[in-house]
Image (tube, rainbow, N blue to C red):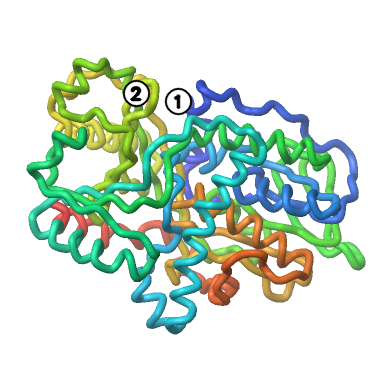
Amino acid sequence: MRRIYEDAAYRTPGACWWRESAAPAALPRVSGDRRTEVAIIGGGFTGLNAALVLANAGIDATVIDTEQPGWGASGRNGGFCCLGGSKASGKTIGQMFGTDQRVQWHKAERAAVDHVAALLSDHGIDAETHSDGETVLAHSPKAMLGVRQAAQEAEQTYGVAAEVFDRAELRQRGLNGDFHGGMTLPIGFALNPGKYHAGLLRAVQDANSQVFGQTPAIAINRDGEAWRVDTPSGSVRAQKVILATNGYSSEDVPDWLRGRYLPVQSTIIVTRPITAEEQVAQGWTSLQMCYDSRILLHYFRLMPDGRFLFGMRGGLRATPTAEAQLARKIRADFARLFPAWRDVDINHEWSGLLCLTRRLTPFAGPVPDMPGVFAAFGYHGNGVAMGSYAGARLADLVMGRAPTGPFPDFLSLPPRRFPLGSKRRVLPAPAYAVAALFDR
């Protein structure tokens, strides 16, 4: 396997709250040679959703994961089940692909949120859901003008009315911090991604699909009319293969992936439970999931047990020095935005890799020149909903049927390669530097 980050980026996170609140699976590795109809590489939200759809259609699917299912981004994210999945705006999507494709994309965003909600309900998964939609908080007066403009467009785009509020209302809404107002869009909810993943894994196993851990795919080769996925402890022979490794992909499994995905880091801290008195002192008592309007945004929420989750974008290295710098910065940002909590203990901290594509839109479709091989990746930091939905719709394509929900054609356009090859992770650095200036 060839990956583009330092080894530390791929280690199991040692202080991740989700791993404590929902014990990760301990599944056996593949042993010997196995046969299946569809081999799925990657046991996160995308891979398991694909497996569940296939199993419910009576198709034998086998899932393998490099570590244990949920070890990658599905077990490290902030738990925001919300609109998104593309870094390109709706306007840009319309310019690139046409108005109809933009409309279909916005329908797919909503369908992705509804898809996860239905999974939780249908399979009785208690994922500690909370938050009535998602709130964006303006970090400057100028940003507040943009928030108001976005609110005016929300009804036409998503068919819902956004609620706008100014700085004077923050405390009464239980959202007090260093912000200038905000907007709530009533679509989406927060959850514990560890518990969502654990419930999804149970559903896949209950549907009689096989799931294996500690089984990295080290090669994919043609084997007669089928494909053979080689692992250190055996192989999986299948008629079709799904690649669902997102930002944790390898440059050479298969070679087609090389340069087509760009992992970037996101870092999260979680505090000890904050008491009711401490919440009142800061003026933050809401369970609403929020993010701010910065380019290098922060995302945060008070969880039902009183812990506060705070995350940020911006890391491009996984060296000890870089990680120490990120740890200092995230604590400084947290203290600046929520000064009453600057001395609250932070008990958990971890990082994960989200995934960009060069077009800044997700990909979910067939891999060119590899008949029977499919892939889905590139959710741009919003993979809880879109990663789940993409996996389910990719399963439709694998079965040769039309997607059973909104699915714009451009999602199946193969992404172009980034320049600089294995050094491409330096590409966002200039943009990050400029963004830091605008975000002040």
Check disc 2: other Cα within 10 Å, few if <14, some if 14-19, many if 20+: some
In the picture, measured across the screen, residue 240 lies left or right of residue 74, that is right
Counting residues from the start of the chain, the first of labels 2 and 1 encountered is 1
Task: Name which residue lies at 68% across and 37% down.
Answer: 201
Task: Name which residue lies at 60% across and 72% down.
Answer: 412
Query: Is residue 396 shown to the viewer in this render?
Result: yes
What secondary structure is found at the residue carrying circle 1? helix
Q: In the image shown, does 119 or 300 lie closer to the viewer?
A: 119
Query: Is residue 381 shown to the viewer in this render?
Result: no
Q: Is residue 25 above or below residue 388?
A: above
**In the rendered structure, which amino acid carries the disc numbered 1?**
Trp
Task: Name which residue lies at 32% across and 28% down.
Answer: 308
- Residue 307 is marked as 2
Residue position marked by numbered label 1 in the rendering: 17
**In the rendered structure, which amino acid carries the disc numbered 2?**
Arg
In the picture, measured across the screen, residue 372 lies left or right of residue 185, that is right
The image shows residue 47 at horizontal and vertical percentages of 66, 49
What secondary structure is found at the residue carrying circle 2? loop
Q: Is residue 358 above or below residue 232?
A: below
Task: Name which residue lies at 59% across and 46% down.
Answer: 118
The image shows residue 6 at horizontal and vertical percentages of 47, 43
Q: Is residue 349 above or below residue 143?
A: above
Q: Is residue 85 above or below residue 271?
A: below
Marks 2 and 1: CB-CB under 8 Å?
A: yes
- Residue 52 is marked as none
